[in-house]
Amino acid sequence: MTLAATFVFFAALVFLLVVRTHTLLAYFQQEEYQSGRYLATVAKMRLYDIISSAAVAVLFFLNTWLDRPVVPLLVAALVFVVVGWRERRYKFKKPLVKTARLKRLRALVLPVLAALALAVWWWPPLAIVVLEIAPLVIVGVNALLAPGQARINEGYVEEARLKLAGFAGVKIGITGSFGKTSVKHMLAQVLALDGNVFYSRGSINTVLGLTRHIRQRLQPAHQYLIAEMGAYQIGSIERLANFIRPEVGIITAVGDAHLERFGGIAQVAQGKSELAKFVCENGRLVVTTEDVLQHAPFHDLFTRYRQKFVVCGPSDNADVQILESRLGKDGRSVNLRVGERVLELVVPLLGSYNAANIALVVGTVSRLAPDLLEALPAFVPHLEQTQHRLEKKEKVSAPLLLDDAYNSNEVGFREAVEVLKTLADERGGKSILVTPGIVELGDRHEAVHRGLGELSGKLCDAVYVVNPQRIPSFLDGARAGGKAMVTTVQRFSEAQKAIDREFRDPRDVVLYENDLPDVLEEARLL
């Protein structure tokens, strides 16, 4: 009977390890297979075993008095199955993507964990060690596979480089602390009036991400290539620029996004300026805003290469001058002066920052395909909204939803809350905000969130704070605002269910301001 019970214990442990491996690999993939960041996430998100390990420890401690080894084996096996079944039903916001790399990693991790699990035949309490060591096994196997993975990646990158070298169209790079995805999608739609456009879908903005799209989708018939370029440290944009080799560079903004990684706004500006520097030295056109030119690296390049710059902004000195920007029932009305021409555009986008975004698009088009300018007033009102970036979603007999779930920053957050308030007042309904705050603010985390909380508490009727332990100053600020009903929830889905119950008036407006990935939401209990 003890042998049979041990077998049941072993089988249940293996089942739990298979489920646990899926959980841990999902977080590992979200951290882009970076071991240091992943191990920090393991600690922060409690991705180590608690329930099963505690059960094994308690049961086998009690067994010293019970002297009946079958009981703890079977009870522990039951705990393994219950924990595994519960964990298996967890719904990730960003599910595990079964890439070739992931399959190679899992194909080695599972046998290693199964081999370690064999130790339970010698002494069952060693199951605790096997469960707790699982994250380290993943990191170790990943390190073992790293040289081969690097060779595979470089092969893919080289294949993409060859396609880029043979590309005869115009290559455009876009970067910025915020706005780059929106500008990319708007520019792609406008340039499609002139020819076939290749652009990276969604928020793809790394060398490997772009490599995959270029290998799979870039065709000789494309006349324009638009590549979004993300940066997490000095040198990121330089690497991307050397890879894409753009003739045109668009820099949307320099802001506080990724301060935690860069260390300061001056470093952010330096990182973003790498695109402008590359284009100034190797290309023909840099399109940016007057605000961006206030930062030293850009000002220096502008002074040296003025003839290559198209500058957008509200002043009379701007090449594309923003004359007016106001929110209306059909979107945002933006009037622009381009040379002697004045364009009166209605952009189906809500935030005031879209005035600068559409100005960047117009500035680029004015140099690449100037004949399109005449068509813009009729075409721009039909631009598709950029998904999850203050995207307006209407349903019959339900509140209006403003989906601003991606890549929130301080400026965009404030703008979104003000738009929420404006639309709710126009409709005669309540304004409801759901947010987990924003990320990567470094030393400014508490101060920025306190200010955002106070604004939200003053302007909104209801505020749902997701995972308040991460943003206590936002919670304090929202409560101090004096107007909003403030509710705390642990997960975004909890807020959605509460709103579905409590706010059904079609006049109401709900804003989803940022939706953090699993690695930044609430801690798990495994």
Image (spheres, helix red, strand yellow):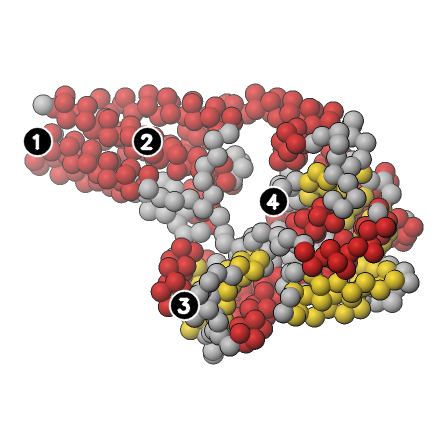
Local SS, label 4: loop
Q: Is residue 207 shown above or below 104?
A: below
| Amino acid on which the number 3 mark rests in the picture | Arg
Q: Say which residue appears at 51% left-offset and 29% top-offset.
A: 99
Q: Is residue 510 visible?
A: no
Local SS, label 2: helix
The quadrant where residue 149 appears: top right
- Give me the C-alpha separation between circle 1 and circle 3: 58 Å
| Residue carrying label 3 | 504
- The residue beneath circle 4 is 202
Mark 2: amino acid: Leu
Residue 477, placed above or below residue 467: below
Residue 352 placement (x, y as % from top left)? 68, 65
Marks 4/1: CA–CA distance? 58 Å
Mark yes or no: residue 502 visible. Answer: yes
Residue 68: image tag = 1
User: Is 499 left, or right, of 248 in this rendering?
Assistant: left
Q: Earlier in the sequence, mark 4 or mark 1?
A: 1
**Is 394 left, or right, of 317 in this rendering?**
left
